[in-house]
């Protein structure tokens, strides 16, 4: 596993760096909920990105914990853990990494960090929701001997944190 990949909790100081990384190296559709209007990083979409993280992670009552993914000292993406209500002690994982940093082991390292963070926080299982064509996520799950379940256009998996390495 790569040792130069760290997760740092998102805060106000890191939010602008995260936006800059997203604008430079990702499509808005990969990193935030859809926003109506012309494609690309419009001013509206940049503002929505900041609002999204403020409301989800930096508000007085956050619904999830977001981490900035750092390689060396470079911000390359974000990872999140969102507790799932009505699912026991379960938490949903989410990740995006800038395009120029994909396919070189960053995602694998992030996934391992998320497993460890979720376990330390006391969760029993980690939920992953992806698409049938997301080979990288399928490979990350396969490395843990997890076979995801396909239901139409959704592919989901539950990782038992007591068992996963
Ligand atoms: C999914 C994502 C986080 C994976 O991160 P990554 O840094 O590219 O992943 P890694 O380099 O650690 O690769 C993990 C595995 O996937 C494989 N892989 C990576 N990119 C791949 C690609 N485009 N096609 C096929 N396999 C791929 C790697 O070979 C590796 O498999 P291996 O360990 O068996 O060799 C990243 O691609 C991403 O941010 N995608 C856009 C957002 C997204 O889809 N998020 C996930 C939502 S659930």
Image: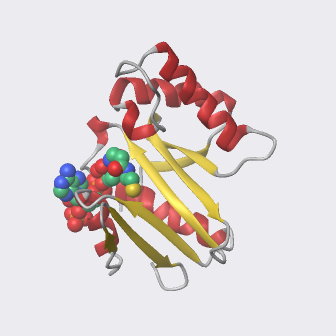
- Residue 92 seen by the camera: yes
**Left or right of 108 in this view: 136:** left
**Left or right of 145 in this view: 19:** right
Location of residue 144 by image quarter: bottom left
Residue 151 is situated, as x and y percent measured from the top left of the image, at: 33, 70
**Left or right of 121 in this view: 33:** left
Image point 34% across, 74% down: which residue?
Answer: 148
Q: Quarter of the image containing the N terminus?
A: bottom left
Residue 147 is situated, as x and y percent measured from the top left of the image, at: 31, 79
The residue closer to the viewer here, 146 or 85, is 85
Q: Residue furthest right?
A: 60
Location of residue 90 by image quarter: bottom right
Q: Quarter of the image containing the C terminus?
A: bottom left
Location of residue 121 by image quarter: bottom right
- Residue 70 seen by the camera: no
> In this picture, is 71 found above or below 74?
below
Image point 67% across, 67% down: which residue?
Answer: 85
Q: Residue furthest bottom?
A: 163
Image point 48% across, 54% down: which residue?
Answer: 94
Residue 134 is situated, as x and y percent measured from the top left of the image, at: 26, 56
The residue closer to the viewer here, 18 or 137, is 137
> In this picture, is 4 found above or below 50?
below
> In this picture, is 101 found above or below 120?
above
Q: Residue furthest top?
A: 43
- The structure's colour scheme is secondary structure
> In this picture, is 12 found above or below 138?
above
The residue closer to the viewer here, 51 or 107, is 51
Residue 48 is situated, as x and y percent measured from the top left of the image, at: 56, 26
Q: Quadrant of ligand 1?
A: bottom left
């Amino acid at each position: 596993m790569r040792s130069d990949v760290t997760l740092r909790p998102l805060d106000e100081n890191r939010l602008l760096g995260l936006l800059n990384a997203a604008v430079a190296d990702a499509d808005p559709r990969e990193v935030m909920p859809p926003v109506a209007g012309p494609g690309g990083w419009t001013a509206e979409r940049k503002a929505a990105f900041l609002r999204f993280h403020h409301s989800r992670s930096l508000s007085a009552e956050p619904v999830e914990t977001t981490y900035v993914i750092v390689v060396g000292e470079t911000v390359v993406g974000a990872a999140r853990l969102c507790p799932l209500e009505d699912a026991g002690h379960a938490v949903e994982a989410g990740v995006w990494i800038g395009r120029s940093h994909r396919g070189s082991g960053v995602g694998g390292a992030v996934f391992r960090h998320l497993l460890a963070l979720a376990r330390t926080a006391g969760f029993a299982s980690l939920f992953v929701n992806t698409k049938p064509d997301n080979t990288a996520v399928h490979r990350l799950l396969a490395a843990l001997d997890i076979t995801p379940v396909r239901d139409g256009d959704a592919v989901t998996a539950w990782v038992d944190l007591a068992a996963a390495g």
